[in-house]
Amino acid sequence: MQGPDHLRRVQLIFQNPYDSLNPRHTVAETLEQPLRLYFGLSGQALRDRSAEILERVRLGAHFLDRLPSQLSGGEKQRIAIGCAFAANPDLVLCDEVTSALDVSVQAAVLDLLNALKHKQGTTYVFVSQDLAVVKALSDRVAVLYQGRLCEIGPSDRVYARPSHPYTEVLLGAILEPDPDTAPRLSADDVVERAPPERGCPFQRRCPRKIGDICDTLMPPWRAASTDHAIRCHHEIDALKPVQRPGGSG
Ligand code: SF4
């Protein structure tokens, strides 16, 4: 019996490939599970399809009989990606999928994810605290603070011109220095264990805080454009990025 189609269409890739693969299953056994479940494959067809998937994630058929203990971190994550794509999904949830990998391996995994996205037309919901990784892969970005959405918009616009104070602080901390346009807003480095009970989630650290209204009322959504919005009590026009001294803008 084949698995329900709605389960096939949404797949997951987890943060840590060291934990997400069963240490007792060979690569073939891991890849065969979704192929049996969703497409009812068996026998040689199953083996051939598993080998095809390994090619697609830039490994090879010679990996089929290996155990996870015989794989590097990057190879394990490619198997996890192959397992997700074996289901031929419409949507893949990627939870910090590069954060457990060496920096040298991250770029190769991101390149693979990008290639698979374009080849198969798959959508990713890509969760990461690494802003450079998000920028490399995303078309749209949703910025959360304390689990609450504060800005959502096209990736290129949010990175070039962050509008919410938290996004500006976040990007100001990592962007390359740019004498004209780089934001340099900063916030106190306070550890927040829980969001405030009322008002704006960013109220305790916001360098642009207006006053009591931020402490008491949840800010409204404000449209920066038809597909870009922030949640703040400031009017959009009042939230121009802070310029470096001597900047032209
Ligand atoms: S609502 Fe107030 S505290 Fe929240 S981001 Fe806007 S200015 Fe800052």
Image (cartoon, helix red, strand yellow):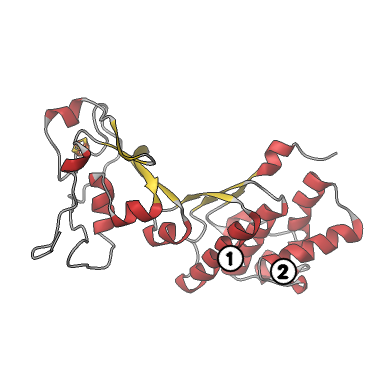
Q: Is residue 141 above or below residue 97?
A: above
Residue 55, disc: 2
Identify the secondary structure beneath mark 1.
helix
Quadrant location, ligand no. 1: top left
The quarter of the picture where the C terminus appears is bottom left
Mark 2 C-beta to ligand 1 under 8 Å: no
Q: CA distance from mark 1 to mark 2?
A: 11 Å
* 120 relative position to 231: left or right: right
Kind of residue sitting beneath label 1:
Leu
Please give left or right for residue 6 compared with residue 105 in the image.
Answer: right
Residue 243's spot in the image, x, y percent?
A: 14, 58
Please give the residue where the numbered disc 1 appears in the rendered image.
112
**Could you tell me if residue 143 is visible in this image?**
no
Callout 2 environment at 10 Å: few (<14), some (14 to 19), or many (20+)?
Answer: some
| Residue at horizontal 19 percent and vertical 42 percent from the top | 237
Residue depicted at 49% across the width and 67% down the height: 106
Picture coordinates of residue 46, whole percent (x, y): 85, 57
Residue 175 point in image, percent of width and height: 28, 63
Please name the amino acid that badge 2 sits on: Glu
Residue displayed at 63% across by 64% down: 78
